[in-house]
DNA sequence: CGAACGAGTCAACGGGGTGTCGAGTTACGG
DNA sequence: CCGTAACTCGACACCCCGTTGACTCGTTCG
């Protein structure tokens, strides 16, 4: 389904069949979106803003993307790919002990999204209005849940973790916590954990939830 | 600040100074909003829909509320008041053991929002677009966090819970989990925990996070 | 009783956003 | 040098928002 690897390799999101010199334009639109998102929320950015930012008129924008959401979706594809890559690297890395594995995974998760603050906040906003954004996130979320559930089951089978609720349910709850906590710390509204304390706190909750006893 | 007790006691949200026979209209608008939210998302409901549903024209709507968000805010005030009341009742109730206390609090929290599914989902959507909704939620969230943090500190002081991250940070993380998990189970998109399993799973995570060892 | 006042009502307007259509304008391969 | 496909935009139709100004009541009070 998703193969968003190279810059504009995610064909199908835009409208144009294939190659042309106007790839520049496409990139300019994406860059403009990223730039504008740094200064105002998604809802305050119009298609016209994106078009003018890229030096084209509004109708021309529609030649490259079907809507404002499509632009965001393309941007998100990149971050998702990055997050998946980082996560895979972590899961494959040498497990110097199971507990440290969780720590590294959470830190990677946190770092990926912190590195794209504006985009993360925009994505959350768009989730309310775009079914496609919802679907993309559901897909990503599901992948993480499955990975975590598998890991939890492995720890239980190995005797390292006690029995408890279905591993999948636990994974959903904990991943949900990650999502909300990190979003809050990035968005700035409402009570949030200080950026530097996010990972330690999350690690603590994950470890106790999975293994029972608090870490040494 | 907030005193939303009776039906339209939350004065200040609407525009009209005070009483008049047109209180009917105001209630009709609120009822229409609640009804329409059962069938479509907030974003798909226009001011005109609300006005027509209440038997008035669009301009007249503005005589009663300053915006669509104001209607939602009034609706939310009720639920918040209900949630606070339920929560207070739980915290004051006879503590048949600390662990059962948490269980009851989480069940109450869950029940309150499940009882207003459409509204809960709409509120989450509005949070992206309305600063007032964000502020209201931040206020409510903060209240819960403080209660929980206090309870955690009490358990630690009593020697029943081990040391760990700052109680406030722990409370934020766990309350965030509640919010996201319950929202997911109500909204229907993305992976979610089955409605009946939500409370048990949350209880488990809370207990291990606070006390370390899993429950008997 | 009949002015006067305030609650309640809405047609009409101005402004901003969206998405589309059709008529251009390049630019390059034959 | 010509056709075809990439690319561009003026103009249109539509939807929604929030406001204005005038109009209709009912009540109250001189």
Image: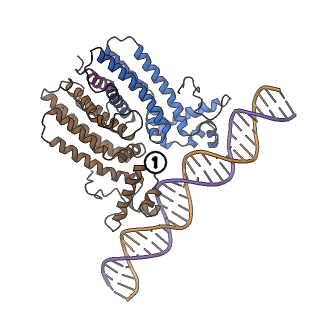
Chain colours: A blue, B brown, C orange, D purple
Who is closer to the viewer here, D18 or B46?
B46
Measured as percent of width and height from the top left, residue A80 is found at 47, 27
Measured as percent of width and height from the top left, residue B203 is found at 24, 32
**Helix, strand or loop under label 1:** helix
Q: Is residue B154 magenta?
A: no
Measured as percent of width and height from the top left, residue D7 is found at 68, 35
The residue positioned 24% from the left and 37% from the top of the image is B106
Report the quarter where the C terminus of chain A lies: top left
Measured as percent of width and height from the top left, residue A187 is found at 39, 35
Question: Residues in magenta?
Answer: A195-213
Hey, which quadrant is residue B157 in on the image?
top left
**Whether residue B40 is situated above or below residue B210 in the rendered picture:** below
The residue positioned 58% from the left and 43% from the top of the image is A48
- Identify residue for label 1: B43
**Whether residue A86 is situated above or below residue D13 in the rendered picture:** above
The residue positioned 32% from the left and 42% from the top of the image is B138
Q: Residues within 10 Å of mark 1 (few under 14, many from 20)?
A: few
What is the number of callouts on the image? Answer: 1
């Amino acid at each position: 389904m998703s193969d968003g690897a190279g810059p504009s390799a995610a064909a199908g999101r835009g409208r144009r069949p294939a190659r042309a010199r106007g790839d520049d334009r496409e990139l300019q639109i994406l860059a403009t979106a990223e730039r504008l998102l740094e200064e105002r929320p998604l809802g305050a950015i119009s298609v016209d803003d994106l078009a003018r930012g890229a030096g084209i008129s509004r109708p021309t924008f529609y030649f490259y993307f079907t809507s404002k959401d499509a632009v965001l979706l393309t941007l998100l594809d990149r971050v998702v790919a990055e997050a998946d890559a980082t996560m895979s690297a972590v899961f494959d890395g040498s497990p110097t002990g199971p507990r440290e594995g969780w720590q590294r995974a959470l830190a990677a998760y946190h770092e990926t999204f912190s590195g794209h603050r504006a985009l993360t906040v925009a994505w959350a906003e768009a989730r309310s209005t775009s079914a496609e954004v919802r679907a993309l996130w559901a897909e990503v979320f599901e992948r993480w849940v499955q990975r975590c559930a598998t890991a939890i089951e492995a720890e239980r089978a190995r005797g390292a973790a006690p029995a408890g609720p279905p591993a999948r349910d636990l994974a959903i709850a904990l991943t949900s916590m990650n999502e909300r906590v990190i979003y809050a710390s990035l968005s700035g509204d409402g009570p949030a954990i200080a950026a530097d304390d996010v990972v330690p706190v999350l690690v603590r909750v994950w470890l106790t939830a999975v293994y029972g006893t608090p870490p040494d």
